[in-house]
Amino acid sequence: MQSISILGSTGSIGTQALSLVRLHPDKFRVSALTAHSNAELLFEQVREFRPEVACLTKEIPLGAIPEDVRFCRWVMGPDSLKVAAAEVPADMVLVSVVGIAGLQSVMDALHAGRQVLLANKEALVTGGHLVMDAARRAGKPLLPVDSEHSAIFQCLQGAADNTPVRLLLTASGGPFRTWEKERIDRATREEALKHPNWSMGAKITVDSASMFNKALEIMEARWLFDMPADKIDVLVHPQSIIHSAVEFADGAVIAQLGVPDMRVPIQYAMAYPHRLPTGSQPLDLFSLGQLTFEKGDEVRFPALRLARQCLAAGGAACTILNGANEAAVAAFLQGKMPFGAITRLVEGALDRLGNLPAENLDDIFDADARARRAVAEMLPAMVG
Ligand code: NAD
Ligand code: MG
């Protein structure tokens, strides 16, 4: 029996992780759950999974907590994440909050010696060197949940001590894969939220449409697998069956395949090194017929080019890209600007801020705040 704390339990990853706990009550027990604002869903989850601690990062009056869920300890406010990540005893901490909010939690969990299951890619994008160092010191390598990184991690299980020479990071290409640049620029919120293969939270779905998600994943892979960016290729693969692959010195390529279902990588991290049923459909290659591949287009999807530029620049460049993108996506989701403005705002923030240091968490949070301010200042010019 393994105990798990889930940060961001009301989100797409969090709810799927809980569905696996529900499927395997003899294997997993919930220690802590956290949500940002969806208090009603958190109440339901607390009723069902009976954690020791429940946290709401956006405070509500204690009186608003229903009687029947008061058996557990309730913690409110942004600092409550630390209670769930590091104070409540747990074998594993699944960090599935969205955005840079995950960075501090990952560091807190590692400092407390917890096994971190990492869905929140932004922690590695912004603080990759600090997170990897903390994981090494804790002697607890991160277990990736992101499907591509889980795939690479799974492929490496058969690698003995052979280091891969190249990582092949697959991408669905998102809803705008075949669209002309001008049409992408004018795309609406509804169009961007229609992902062809995956059902995910709003922010990552918009990132998949712009390919900023793949940009963040190149950065994530760079840190998780200690691989230089020029050895990480992006392979657009619209069927999302090959979740990623690794190439070795002899030319052999090992890939991980499956239907697009996040329960598989979430389960792999939760049960590692074992594998458990997930409720996922088996892969039927006959009905698929063929798998296809394309090169990522850096003209229609500048995010891919920006990712490589930021990794080459070092310092806080990736943090600026991430913070500007988070702020820009939030503005786009509020209907304040056209889709193409996301990239323009990220490029604008990178140009305005140049590079900044990223020696410690304070530097990173400072760079993030500046990127968001830069976006806020440029935003009025993007409206319309
Ligand atoms: P989501 O929006 O569905 O859920 C986010 C969760 O985080 C919710 O529980 C929410 O309450 C909480 N949250 C939001 N803002 C917060 C804040 N400021 N502080 C604390 N908690 C906050 O997101 P998601 O799609 O589940 O994605 C979560 C993370 O996993 C992201 O980093 C995403 O990139 C990554 N990821 C998701 C998927 C997927 O299939 N959804 C796949 C790969 C990676
Ligand atoms: Mg992914």
Image (cartoon, rainbow, N blue to C red):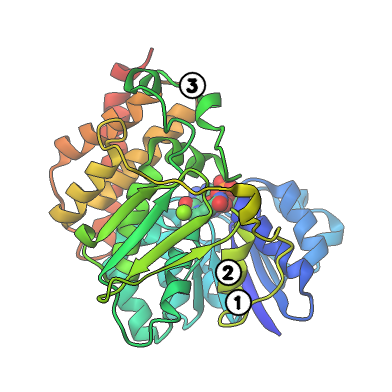
Near-viewer residue (337 or 80): 337
Q: Callout 3: 10 Å neighbours few (<14), some, many (20+)?
A: some
Q: Residues within 10 Å of mark 2 (few under 14, many from 20)?
A: many
Considering depth in this image, is 321 or 72 the residue closer to the camera? 321
Q: Which mark is residue 22?
A: none
Spot occupied by residue 6 in the image (x, y as percentages of width and height): 61, 65
Instruction: State the CA–CA distance, disc 1 to disc 2.
Output: 6 Å
Q: Is the residue under label 3 in contact with that under label 1 (CB below 8 Å)?
A: no
Judged left or right of residue 383, residue 267 is right
Residue drawn 30% across the image and 30% down it: 300
First in sequence: mark 1 or mark 3?
Answer: 1
In the image: residue 245, left or right of residue 146? left
Q: Amino acid at mark 1?
A: Val
Q: Amino acid at mark 3?
A: Thr
Residue 132 shown left or right of residue 358 in the figure: right
Label 2 element class = helix
Q: Quadrant of residue 129?
A: bottom left
Would you say the residues marked 1 and 2 are in contact, meaning their CB atoms lie under 8 Å apart?
yes
Disc marking residue 188: 3
Mark 2 and mark 3 lie on one chain; the one further toward the N terminus is 2
The numbered dot on residue 88 is 1
